[in-house]
Amino acid sequence: MADERPTSGMGARNGGWGKPGGVVGWVYASGAANAVFYTLTFSGAIFMLFLSALGLNTARIGVILSFFPFCGLLAPLIARRVEMFGAKRAYLVFYSLRTVLMATLLLTPWVVTMWGATVGFRFVAVVMFLFAVSRAIAETGYFPWSREFVPAEMRGKYGAILQAVSAATSVAALAGAGWYLARGEGLPRFMTLMAVGIVFEALALVLAAKVPGGGPHNPSRATTPFVELWGAVKDRAFMRYLVGLSACTLATGVWGFVPLYLSRQVGMTAGQVVWLQNAGLVASLFLWFVWGWAADRFGGKAVLMIGLTMTALQPLGYLLLPFQKAQWQVGIAMGVLAWTGGSAAAVGIGSDWLLFVRLIRPERGVALTAINYACLGLMGGMGFLGAGFFVDVVSRFTDLPDPYAPLFVLGSSLAILSLVGFHGIDGGGVSARRLAIMILRTNPLHLAETVWRYYAEQERKDEAK
């Protein structure tokens, strides 16, 4: 349900863990509707192209994109208040507020017409900053709430199905959006897509309200935010996790500028860029299930390390695109984006499993998830902000024909640094090398059958509870 991610008995008391009318059935349905919202509004290629249509340079685009992760720094400061207010209530109230704020963004064409592009940029920046604050508060509640309705032993399965369902609806949304964008010009076409997304977000909130748990909780008075932070600092495994996560999240800013690279440097149209984003989503549809099965069966750390290795290699494909013949560019870009989608799926499933299954103890769940979210915010904000200014400086003060090339090399280096950071954590399970060899040697059809049987068996176990 969140724009990104306990007792098993809860699912049984509410219609079965995996049944459509049970707890996670509502979660999956809400996640699917929410995926349409963020795909059409503030995440991915469509939002990047919207900002580009406003005439913003990469530095200003980086500033706006940095609002979302930077506001994650609020998490440790408000975690205790969110506990007392109620995690579920915070999620619903502040996600509702961000929906209202997104609706005000529909006034952008009118603002630009009346007062010009500069005022339009300021208007968008203010609205998106308030939007990002509301989102951060809501997701501070979501992560501890999710621990109540997702059993630890099913974390890989839950993440895989939720992300696959979200990817499927995003594919449909992007397909329609790409067709629509190709038929028009200017800002109004983006406003229409945002309006559609807002309707789906309202539906997502109605569905999320049916998920139980997340009630108000009074934290221990003996535990202060400073004590919780100090406890996290003394946890060597968790600190190693934050080091690896920091490098990985910094690289997110690099890959966030791929749509602009395809549009401005490679020369693809807005419709092509949006449709190409579907390549990564389609690839992740199957791979979310594979990585979820692998995490539950062999350990999430191996999945994470494979994903980071793939991430380190993916810039090679992007750097080759401008040198290809025009008729081959779309096909090659589709393959590279599919690779990117597969690596992102592995990193998402693996890091989530490592955090929630291996590192977080129930009594410290809220504190550590808040610190984790703040780290994501700080590094994600620095990544987007730094990447935007980096490309702007390279294009202004150097004679390089491709200002994005050094950025992609930097992204690869950060992925390698992340590998080093995560390497020292005891994740249990098999090694990444052994898992990769096993998957590569397995017939794809047999692998698909094995994964299918695993999820079918888990469903039978859920229904028996």
Image (spheres, rainbow, N blue to C red):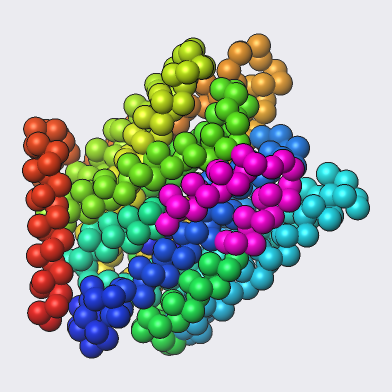
Q: Is residue 114 above or below residue 200?
A: above
Residue at 64% in and 22% down: 394
Q: Give percent across and percent down for residue 77.
A: 53, 69
Q: Is residue 462 left or right of residue 158?
A: left
Q: Is residue 437 left or right of residue 59?
A: left
Residue 233: quarter of image = bottom left
Residue at 56% in and 22% down: 266
Residue 187 among those drawn in magenta: yes
First to last magenta residue range = 169-197
Q: Is residue 127 left or right of residue 410?
A: right
Q: Is residue 73 above or below residue 405?
A: below
Q: Residue furthest right?
A: 114
Q: Is residue 317 above or below residue 308?
A: above
Q: Give percent across and percent down for residue 156.
A: 23, 59
Q: Give percent across and percent down for residue 24.
A: 30, 73
Main secondary structure type of the part rendered in magenta: helix
Q: Is residue 4 above or below residue 315?
A: below
Q: Quadrant of the N terminus?
A: bottom left
Residue at 15% in and 69% down: 459
- Examine the rendering and report whether any part of residue 174 can be seen: yes
Residue 229: quarter of image = bottom left
Of residues 238 and 27, the one drawn nearer to the viewer in this rendering = 27
Of residues 402 and 67, the one drawn nearer to the viewer in this rendering = 402
Residue at 60% in and 31% down: 269
Residue 462 among those drawn in magenta: no
Q: Quadrant of the C terminus?
A: bottom left
- Examine the rendering and report whether any part of residue 381 can be seen: no
Q: Residue furthest front?
A: 183
Residue 194: quarter of image = bottom right
Of residues 72 and 176, the one drawn nearer to the viewer in this rendering = 176
